[in-house]
Image (cartoon, rainbow, N blue to C red):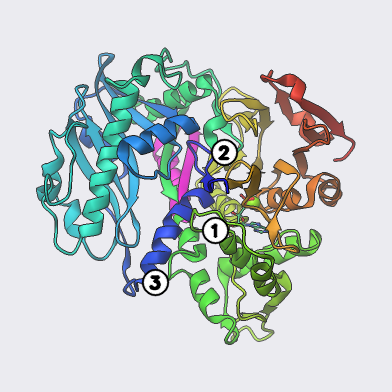
C-alpha cells in the first residue's frame, strides 16, 4: 500500500485548519491526558513591535521577507531537524542599520503541554542567538520559561549546538514539555536562518529572497493572496509586503502629519496568521483600530474554537445532545447563519460534518480511508437538521441549541474565519477607518483602497503550482475567500483525498479543485466557497445565482485531464488573468451568471 501522508500545500498564511489540526492533534491527546480546568490563561508579554525592538535595538530599518518552502525543502528541513513541522513557510525579519544587516529574527509558535506559546528568536549575522523572548504564553503552569533567567541559556548558541533539554538547557520543573518544544522551536529558527541566509546551500540560490529589493516604492500596491495559503504571491508581492511591513516597523513616519501611513500587525489567531493593515493619516487611531480588530478576532476564537475546551462551542458540543443548552450572541448567530447556508445549498454546507472529518484523520494529521461501515456508523450524526435551535419568545428566557443525535458535533472551520473577519471589520469602522485590509488565513475583507489606487489587488493561487498565481482580483469594499483541494489532503494509492467532505456521503469531495468567492461579507465568502466546493461546477453556479452580489470562480477537473476554470461574469470583471506555465493544461471559460 502506498504510504500515507497528509500534505499541507499552503504557505505563508497557513489555513486555519492546517495549523489548527496540528494543534488539535496534540491538544486532543493532551486533553485525553486531562487538561486541568482553567488551564488556558492568555498571558501577553510583548507585542510583535516590542519583540522586534528588543531583538533589533540599534536598527533603523526592519524589513520582512517571506520564505516559502517547496515540498522538497520542507522535507529537507524536517529531516535536518528530525521532526515534523506545521509550517510551510516563515516570515523572517531583517534588522538593518545604514542598510547593513544587523541580524535576523523569526516569531514562531510551538505547543507547550496543552496550548501554543509564541516566541521570538533573534540571531546575529554569524548565526548565534542574540536574544530570545516569549510574546504570548497560554497556560497557567510553566510560566517560568518566559523569564530572562531561564531564556538567557539560549543566548550565544548556534545551529551547531544540539540544544537538548537537561543537557544543554537546564529544565524547569513543571514545564518540561514547554522547555522541550522551546528547544525544538529554537533549533527550527536557527535551521531556517542558517539554510536560507547564512551558510546553507539555499543561501546562494533560493529564489525566495535573493535579489529582492528590500523596499519597493510605496506607489506599488499590496497584493494579498485570496487563498488560505498565501504562497501564491510571487516574489514581487513578497517584496511589496516586506516593504509595507518595514515602513511601519521602522517607524520612519513619526507623529501626526498629513501623510497617509500604513499600520499593519500580524498575530496568530485560529491557528493561522491574522493580518490587519490600515492606511490612515492618523497613525494613533490606525494603531488602535488594528489592535481592536485583532483582539476581536481573538475573541471570536475564544468563542468558536473546538479545540479550546472552555470555548462556548466546546461546551455546547459537550452538552447539547443531553439537553438544550443556552446559546447566545455570536455563537448562536454563526450557527443560525450556517443553518441558512445548509438550507440553501441542500445540505452541501454542513457544520455537523466533523465526526466524518475526524474519521478521515484530518484532525490528527494522519490521513486514513475509513471503512464503509465506519462511515455508515457516524453518518446519521452528520446533518444540519440534527441541530435544533429553540428561540425563546420570552426575552427573560434564553435561546437554546439541542442536538438530536448523540454523536453530533459542530465544527465552524468552514465559516468561523469569515465571520470573525466581519466582526473585525465592525471594529475598524467604529474607529472611522476607511482604508483597511483584514486577512484571517486567506479570508479577506478589503475596505476602501490603498492610497491613490482604485482597488486592492489580491492574488488567486494556481491550484497545482503554488509558486504561481492564476491572476489577481481587484476589489474594494468586498470580501473574498478560497476553498481548495490542495490546502489539506492526503494521497493513498495515487488518489487524493481532500479535507472538504460531502456531508451526504461522508466522503471527500472529488472533481472540484478550488472555489474562490467574492461577496459583500466575510461570512458569505467563507460559507459559499465551501458550499460551492461540495456542489461542484453546475450546482454551484445554480447556488451563486441565488445571490446577486456573489461572484465565483470554480476550478474543476475536466474530462480530458485539463484544469477547467469557470468564472461568473461578475468575477471575470474583477479578475485580471496573468500568464501561467503550462497554459495549455488550463481551459478558461466565463459563464453567463451574475
Ligand atoms: P474551508 O477551508 O472554509 O472550505 O473549510 C473547510 C473545513 O471545514 C474543513 O477542514 C472541515 O473542517 C470543514 N468542512 C469540511 N467539509 C465541510 C462541509 N461540507 N461543510 C462545512 N464544513 C466542512
Ligand atoms: Mg469556508
Task: Tell me if residue 380 comes above or below residue 346 in the rendering.
Answer: below
Q: Which residues are magenta?
A: 270-297
Q: Which residue is mark 2?
A: 434
Q: Which mark is on residue 361?
A: 1
Tags 2 and 1 in contact by the CB under 8 Å rule? no
First along the sequence among labels 3 and 2? 3
**Residue 321 appears in view:** yes
Q: Residue at x 85, y 52 (%)?
A: 546
| 161 sits to left or right of 101 | left
Q: Is residue 515 magenta?
A: no
Q: What is the C-alpha distance between the residues marked 3 and 1?
A: 17 Å
**Local secondary structure at mark 1:** loop
Of residues 58 and 429, the one nearer the viewer is: 58
* Mark 2 neighbour class, 10 Å CA radius: few under 14, some 14 to 19, many 20 or more: some
Please determine whether, in this image, residue 243 is positioned above or below residue 377.
above
Q: Is residue 294 magenta?
A: yes
The residue under label 3 is 32
How far apart marks 3 and 2 lie (CA) works out to 46 Å
| In front: label 2 or label 1 | 1
Q: Decide if ligand 2 comes within 8 Å of the CB at mark 2.
A: no
Amino acid at each position: 500500500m502506498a504510504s500515507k501522508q497528509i500534505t499541507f500545500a499552503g504557505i505563508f498564511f497557513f489555513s486555519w485548519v492546517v495549523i489548527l489540526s496540528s494543534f488539535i492533534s496534540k491538544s486532543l491527546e493532551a486533553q485525553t491526558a486531562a487538561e486541568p480546568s482553567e488551564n488556558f490563561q492568555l498571558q501577553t508579554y510583548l507585542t510583535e513591535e516590542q519583540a522586534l525592538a528588543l531583538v533589533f535595538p540599534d536598527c533603523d530599518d526592519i524589513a520582512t521577507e517571506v520564505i516559502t518552502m517547496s515540498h522538497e525543502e520542507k522535507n529537507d528541513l524536517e529531516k535536518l531537524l528530525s521532526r515534523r513541522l506545521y509550517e510551510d513557510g516563515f516570515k523572517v525579519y531583517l534588522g538593518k542599520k545604514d542598510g547593513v544587516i544587523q541580524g535576523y529574527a523569526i516569531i514562531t509558535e510551538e505547543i507547550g503541554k496543552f496550548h501554543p506559546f509564541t516566541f521570538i528568536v533573534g540571531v546575529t549575522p554569524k548565526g548565534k542567538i542574540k536574544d530570545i523572548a516569549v510574546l504570548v504564553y497560554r497556560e497557567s503552569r510553566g510560566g517560568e520559561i518566559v523569564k530572562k533567567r531561564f531564556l538567557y541559556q539560549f543566548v550565544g548558541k548556534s545551529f551547531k549546538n544540539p540544544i537538548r533539554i537537561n543537557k544543554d538547557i537546564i529544565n524547569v520543573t513543571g514545564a518540561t514539555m514547554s522547555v522541550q518544544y522551546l528547544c525544538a522551536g529554537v533549533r527550527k529558527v536557527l535551521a531556517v536562518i542558517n539554510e536560507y541566509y547564512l551558510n546553507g546551500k539555499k543561501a546562494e540560490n533560493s529564489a525566495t529572497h535573493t535579489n529582492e529589493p528590500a523596499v519597493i516604492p510605496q506607489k506599488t500596491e499590496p497584493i494579498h493572496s485570496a487563498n488560505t495559503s498565501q504562497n501564491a504571491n510571487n516574489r514581487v508581492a513578497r517584496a511589496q509586503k516586506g516593504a509595507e511591513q518595514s515602513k511601519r516597523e521602522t517607524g520612519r513616519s513619526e507623529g501626526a502629519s498629513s501623510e497617509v501611513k500604513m499600520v499593519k500587525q500580524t498575530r496568530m489567531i485560529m491557528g493561522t496568521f491574522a493580518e490587519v493593515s490600515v492606511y490612515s493619516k492618523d497613525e494613533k487611531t490606525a494603531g488602535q483600530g488594528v489592535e481592536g480588530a485583532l483582539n476581536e478576532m481573538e475573541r471570536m476564537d475564544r468563542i468558536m474554537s473546538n479545540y479550546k475546551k472552555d470555548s462556548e462551542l466546546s461546551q455546547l458540543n459537550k452538552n447539547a445532545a443531553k439537553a438544550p443548552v443556552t446559546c447566545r450572541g455570536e455563537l448562536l448567530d454563526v450557527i443560525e447563519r450556517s443553518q441558512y447556508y445548509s438550507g440553501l445549498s441542500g445540505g452541501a454546507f454542513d457544520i455537523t460534518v466533523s465526526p466524518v472529518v475526524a474519521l478521515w484523520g484530518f484532525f490528527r494529521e494522519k490521513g486514513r480511508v475509513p471503512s464503509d461501515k465506519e462511515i455508515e456508523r457516524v453518518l446519521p450524526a452528520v446533518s444540519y437538521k440534527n441541530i435544533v435551535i429553540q428561540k425563546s419568545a420570552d426575552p427573560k428566557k434564553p435561546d437554546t441549541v439541542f442536538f438530536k443525535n448523540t454523536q453530533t458535533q459542530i465544527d465552524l472551520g468552514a465559516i468561523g474565519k469569515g465571520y470573525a473577519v466581519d466582526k473585525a471589520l465592525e471594529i475598524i469602522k467604529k474607529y472611522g477607518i476607511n482604508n483597511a485590509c483584514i486577512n484571517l488565513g486567506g479570508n479577506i475583507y478589503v475596505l476602501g483602497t490603498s492610497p491613490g489606487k482604485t482597488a486592492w489587488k489580491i492574488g488567486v493561487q494556481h491550484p497545482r503550482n503554488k509558486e504561481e498565481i492564476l491572476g489577481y482580483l481587484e476589489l474594494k469594499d468586498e470580501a473574498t475567500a478560497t476553498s481548495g483541494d490542495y490546502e489539506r489532503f492526503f494521497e493513498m494509492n495515487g488518489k487524493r483525498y481532500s479535507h472538504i467532505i460531502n456531508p451526504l456521503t461522508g466522503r471527500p469531495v472529488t472533481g472540484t479543485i478550488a472555489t474562490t468567492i467574492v461577496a459583500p461579507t466575510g461570512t458569505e465568502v467563507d460559507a459559499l466557497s465551501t458550499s460551492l466546493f461540495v456542489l461542484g461546477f453546475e450546482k454551484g453556479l445554480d447556488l451563486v445565482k441565488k445571490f446577486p452580489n456573489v461572484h465565483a470562480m470554480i476550478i474543476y477537473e475536466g474530462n480530458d485531464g485539463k484544469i477547467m476554470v469557470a468564472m461568473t461574469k461578475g468575477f471575470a470583471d474583477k479578475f485580471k488573468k496573468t500568464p501561467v506555465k503550462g497554459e495549455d493544461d488550463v481551459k478558461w471559460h466565463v459563464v453567463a451568471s451574475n
